[in-house]
Image: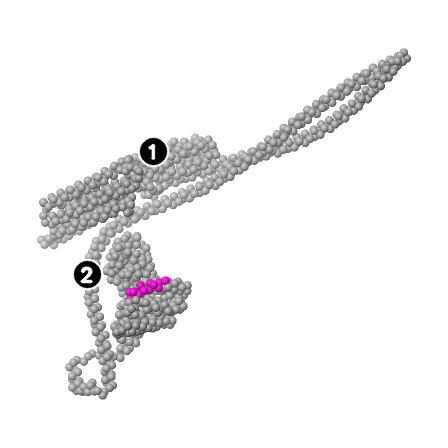
């Protein structure tokens, strides 16, 4: 709007602000039609395809039109008829005019334009396909305009021109740090779009030539004036918001904001510098220069060094048309001084007034009328300028007064910041020491992580080796099974062959027996036949002898010859029959001899084939037995190599653990006795499994997988026990630490000795793990001795202890309230004046604090009752507390802290009222009570339902305790200041030497107090560290951690 006002002041014939109205509906319609026609003409003249800058008078007419109709309906009705998607120059000039309307137009322009957001997004995406020229610039410009509209819709408190006061900026965030955080992010996005357009325009120009004096160059540079105006405000608001955020949030949380601001600061500074050197901008705008270095947001006082960048637009160069106006104005010299009133009558007396009133001097009359009109017009403009100047004076006076008040506030804030700076210096030194410790711890942790990674890699390699060995073992088992199947098949074939051979032997024996029987029968028949032949021969010889006798006696008896002839015939016939039977027996013997030869040949061939088959089967059986022996030997070697690999890996793990405890970097690692005891218990259980697995392997060497697994796990557990034992020794007294270190080293030596025995086959069966178990038992006994006494409490007593502690806390608070009331009555009876007033105010605030603590304890009891009822189920209350022992112990600790804090605060208040105590001790007690109640709230809240009414009551009570604590601190500070004001310093009776002596004593005391303050701060830091360590051990924080340090 300032640009619009300045533009209106530069034009001599300004547009009338009041349109003459005539009655009737026709006149209104005619006026509306004339307005729309005039707007359409101005829009078409401002947005055209000529590559020249938009004329200011046409853009100003469009801006005034939005104020006239209180919106942008007419503008968008005219723009929607333009071919913006087909001509890049036309779209570029539309973006320029639309940017002016968003900045200086009516506030409703933003709302009316949101209806066309989708069309603008599509147009930006369409022009984004071009990689150079106006197309790419149009895409970037449209994204900027969309971002600007969305920003103002989300943040309606920001006007279009972004001009706001500091109070309005604070109101925009509604005093909520989350709103300020989100608003800063949105401003970063907004400024990023502005810088992208800035860079896009500069990158599209050839800066080696004077492009700013050409029409095409001015067409591209003209919209950057609006961009510079936006960037100056966005930069200023971003700096202020970042300072506000740094006062409310930790610096680490805002690291991303600072990095993004640094990047945008460098870009904006460079672009402002480049723009200020262009001839085009020198005539139209005065660009501010940013500081050499960005603001330091970590230093709160740096806000006072920040100077808001102000962009100045000279009134005589706001538009090109103004130059022509200036030339027209030069026709009348308005600087000629007016003649005094005494001179004019003298001139009239000497020359007369006929020239001025001559009715026939038409030339002079016309000239005078034109001059009068021009003078009247200039007079009106001068009057308007005077009124505006007066308003500027009033505004500047008001601003000066406000600035003076702001200066006084900043001076007070500066004094407070200097005091805080001194405190921050001490705290920063303490934090630096803690940071160094944390860095060392982080380095140790990284080393441990790297060693753990290497161990995991070794474990993975061993696992892979074990997997390969397992696969090889599976293959060997499979081949062994195949060979067993083949052996069974060969055995079956051998059995069949042997059965066949037995059958052949039986047949051969039978045939041999048959042949033998046949031969014996033939021999017997032959002997019988020989005997018969011999008998026949004897008979024949006897017959012949008888024949001879008969022949000799034939003569004597003729009758006996016939008988002998018949007998001879019968004998011949019998002889023939015997010869025939003998031939038959010979033929039968020949046949039986041939059959015997055939049987003997077949038996010999079968015997030879059976022998060959038996020899082949015997060879196969021998080969199979040799292969089985080789595979069995390979399998035994593979099993033993896998076992040796596991043992070697376990040795490496234990050696690495022993090397770690001698490493100087390990000194900073700590652990708890509870965690050490759990590691020892796990190692002892693993040793029992190791013995059983070793005995099983000795009895059956095929069962090796379980022994390999147990050896590896045992190495890890014993190594972890060694490391945790050494880390635990860093947390205990020297004597116990030395004993624990010796036990740990003895454990490592016994483990290495046991693994050395297991590496040899001869000594594997005789390996004794009793010494290693004894060393682990010693470490376990030492860990049990080192456990905190608070952990020896039986879990069944936790429920009773919670009730006792809550009741004790309530009693302590009641007692403290009663003592405060008693002290208040004593103070009223004894003290007077300022001291009584201070004591009453302090004790009254302490009484309110006790009432708030009492309400907090009651709310905590109700909430705990809801938690127990909702979470215990069918179990009893004691069982619920025992099941959630960690939460219960935290609740007990918080209750103790609240009761103790109330008692200590009452004692401190008693001493303060008596004049023997310190106000600082009372303030510290108040802060301690606030911290203890916060701990109690956190312990009660951790298991509560977020929608519980008792939880809301507890939170309200916690806020009441915080407010009461603040009231105690405020009343203490106020009382301290009132009492200290009464002790005035009177140096009037001292001489110069005495004052000098007092000055030296004061300086010595200041130095002593500063030294003591530094030492006390270091002691406070050490006490906080020790308190943290002891609280961690008592609470058992280290039990859930798997590492050290």
Q: Residue at x 25, y 50 (%)?
A: 427
Q: Nearer the viewer, mark 1 or mark 2?
A: 2
Q: Quadrant of the C terminus?
A: top left
Q: Is residue 817 visible?
A: yes
Residue in the foreground of this view, choosing between 688 and 17: 17
Foreground residue, 493 or 47? 47
Residue 18 in the image: state x and y as whole percent: 25, 72
Instruction: Determine the residue positioned at 27% across, 36% down.
Output: 797
Nearer the observer, 873 or 554: 873
Q: Quadrant of residue 671?
A: top left
> Disc 1 to disc 2, how far (Cα)?
75 Å
Residue 117 lies in magenta, yes or no?
A: yes
Instruction: Identify the residue position indicated by label 1 in the image.
Output: 778
- Kind of element beneath mark 2: helix
Question: How many numbered badges does the structure rendering display?
Answer: 2
Where does label 2 land, which residue? 405
Q: Is residue 31 visible?
A: no
* Magenta region: 105-118
Up-down relation of residue 261 to residue 723 (above or below)? below
Whichever of callouts 1 and 2 sits on the residue coming sooner in the sequence is 2
């Amino acid at each position: 709007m300032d640009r619009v006002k300045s533009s209106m002041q530069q034009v001599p014939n300004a547009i009338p602000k009041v349109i003459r109205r005539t009655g009737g509906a026709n006149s209104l319609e005619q006026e509306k039609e004339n307005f729309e026609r005039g707007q359409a003409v101005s829009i078409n003249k401002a947005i055209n395809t000529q590559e020249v800058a938009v004329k200011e008078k046409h853009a100003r007419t469009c801006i005034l039109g939005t104020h006239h109709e209180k919106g942008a309906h007419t503008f968008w009705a005219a723009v929607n008829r333009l071919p913006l998607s087909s001509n890049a120059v036309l779209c570029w000039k539309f973006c320029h005019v639309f940017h002016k309307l968003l900045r200086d137009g009516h506030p409703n322009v933003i709302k009316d334009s949101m209806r066309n957001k989708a069309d603008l997004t599509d147009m930006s995406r369409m022009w984004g396909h071009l990689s150079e020229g106006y197309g790419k610039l149009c895409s970037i410009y449209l994204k900027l305009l969309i971002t600007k509209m969305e920003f103002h819709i989300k943040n309606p408190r920001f006007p279009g021109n972004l001009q706001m006061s500091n109070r309005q900026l604070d109101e925009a965030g509604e005093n909520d740090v989350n709103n300020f955080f989100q608003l800063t992010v949105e401003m970063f996005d907004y400024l990023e779009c502005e810088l992208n357009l800035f860079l896009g325009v500069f990158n599209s120009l050839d800066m080696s030539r004077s492009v700013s004096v050409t029409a095409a160059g001015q067409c591209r540079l003209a919209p950057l004036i609006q961009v510079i105006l936006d960037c100056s405000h966005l930069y200023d608001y971003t700096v202020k918001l970042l300072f506000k955020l740094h006062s409310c949030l930790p610096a680490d949380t805002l690291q991303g904001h600072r990095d993004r601001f640094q990047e945008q600061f460098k870009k904006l500074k460079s672009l402002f510098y480049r723009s200020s050197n262009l001839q085009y901008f020198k005539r139209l705008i005065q660009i501010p220069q940013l500081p050499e270095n960005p603001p330091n947001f970590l230093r709160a006082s740096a806000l006072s060094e920040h100077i808001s960048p102000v962009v100045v637009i000279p009134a005589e160069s706001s538009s090109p048309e103004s130059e022509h106006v200036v030339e027209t104005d030069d026709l009348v010299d308005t600087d000629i001084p007016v003649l005094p009133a005494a001179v004019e009558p003298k001139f009239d007396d000497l020359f007369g007034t006929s020239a001025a009133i001559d009715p026939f001097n038409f030339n002079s009359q016309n000239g005078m009328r034109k001059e009068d009109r021009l003078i009247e017009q200039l007079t009106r403009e001068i009057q308007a300028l005077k009124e505006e100047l007066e308003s500027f004076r009033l505004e500047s006076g008001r601003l000066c007064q406000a600035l003076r008040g702001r200066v006084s506030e900043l001076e007070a804030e500066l004094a407070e910041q200097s005091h805080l700076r001194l405190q921050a210096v001490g705290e920063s030194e303490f934090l630096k020491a803690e940071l160094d410790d944390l860095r060392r711890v982080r380095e140790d942790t990284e080393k441990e992580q790297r060693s753990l990674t290497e161990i995991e890699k070794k474990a993975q390699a061993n696992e892979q080796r074990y997997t390969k060995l397992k696969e090889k073992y599976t293959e060997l088992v499979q081949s062994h099974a195949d060979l067993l199947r083949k052996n069974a098949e060969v055995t079956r074939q051998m059995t069949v062959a042997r059965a066949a051979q037995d059958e052949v032997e039986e047949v051969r024996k039978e045939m041999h027996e048959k042949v033998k029987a046949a031969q014996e029968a033939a021999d017997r028949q032959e002997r019988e036949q020989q005997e018969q032949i011999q008998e026949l021969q004897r008979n024949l010889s006897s017959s012949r002898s008888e024949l001879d006798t008969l022949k000799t006696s034939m003569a004597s008896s003729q009758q006996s010859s016939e008988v002998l002839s018949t007998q001879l015939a019968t004998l011949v016939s019998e002889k023939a029959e015997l010869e025939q039977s003998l031939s038959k027996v010979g033929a039968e013997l020949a046949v039986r001899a041939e059959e015997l030869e055939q049987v003997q040949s077949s038996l010999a061939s079968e015997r030879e084939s059976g022998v060959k088959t038996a020899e082949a089967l015997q060879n196969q059986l021998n080969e199979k037995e040799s292969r089985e022996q080789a595979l069995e030997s390979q399998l035994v070697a593979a099993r033993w190599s896998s076992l040796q690999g596991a043992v070697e890996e376990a040795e490496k793990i234990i050696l690495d653990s022993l090397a770690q405890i001698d490493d100087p970097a390990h000194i900073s690692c700590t652990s708890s006795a509870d965690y050490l005891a759990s590691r020892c218990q796990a190692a002892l259980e693993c040793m029992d499994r190791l013995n059983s697995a070793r005995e099983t392997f000795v009895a059956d060497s095929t069962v090796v997988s379980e022994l390999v697994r147990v050896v590896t796990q045992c190495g890890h557990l014993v190594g972890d026990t060694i490391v945790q034992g050494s880390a635990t020794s860093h947390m205990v007294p020297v004597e116990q630490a030395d004993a624990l270190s010796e036990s740990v080293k003895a454990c490592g030596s016994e483990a290495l000795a046991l693994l050395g025995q297991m590496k040899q086959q001869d000594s594997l069966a005789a390996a004794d793990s009793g010494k290693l178990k004894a060393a682990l038992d010693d470490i376990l006994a030492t860990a049990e001795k080192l456990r905190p006494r608070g952990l020896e409490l039986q879990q069944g007593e936790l429920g009773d202890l919670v009730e006792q502690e809550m009741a004790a806390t309530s009693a302590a608070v009641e007692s403290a309230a009663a003592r405060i009331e008693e002290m208040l009555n004593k103070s009223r009876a004894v003290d007077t004046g300022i001291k009584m007033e201070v004591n009453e105010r302090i004790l009254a605030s302490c009484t309110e604090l006790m009432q708030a603590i009492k309400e907090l304890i009651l709310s905590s009891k109700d909430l705990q009752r809801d938690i127990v009822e909702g979470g215990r189920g069918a179990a009893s209350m004691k069982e619920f507390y025992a099941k959630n022992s960690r939460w219960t112990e935290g609740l007990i600790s918080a209750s103790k802290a609240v009761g103790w804090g109330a008692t200590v605060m009452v004692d401190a208040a008693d001493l303060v009222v008596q004049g023997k105590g310190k106000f600082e001790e009372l303030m510290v007690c108040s802060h301690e009570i606030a911290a203890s109640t916060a701990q109690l709230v956190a312990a009660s809240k951790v298991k509560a339902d977020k929608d519980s009414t008792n939880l809301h009551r507890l939170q309200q009570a916690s806020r009441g305790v915080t407010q009461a604590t603040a009231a105690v601190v405020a009343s203490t500070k106020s009382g301290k200041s009132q009492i200290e004001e009464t002790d005035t310093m009177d140096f009037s009776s001292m001489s110069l030497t005495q004052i000098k002596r007092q000055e030296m004593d004061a300086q010595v005391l200041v130095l002593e107090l500063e030294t003591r303050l530094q030492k006390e701060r270091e002691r406070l830091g050490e006490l906080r560290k020790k308190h943290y360590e002891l609280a961690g051990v008592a609470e058992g924080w280290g039990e859930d951690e798997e590492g050290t340090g």
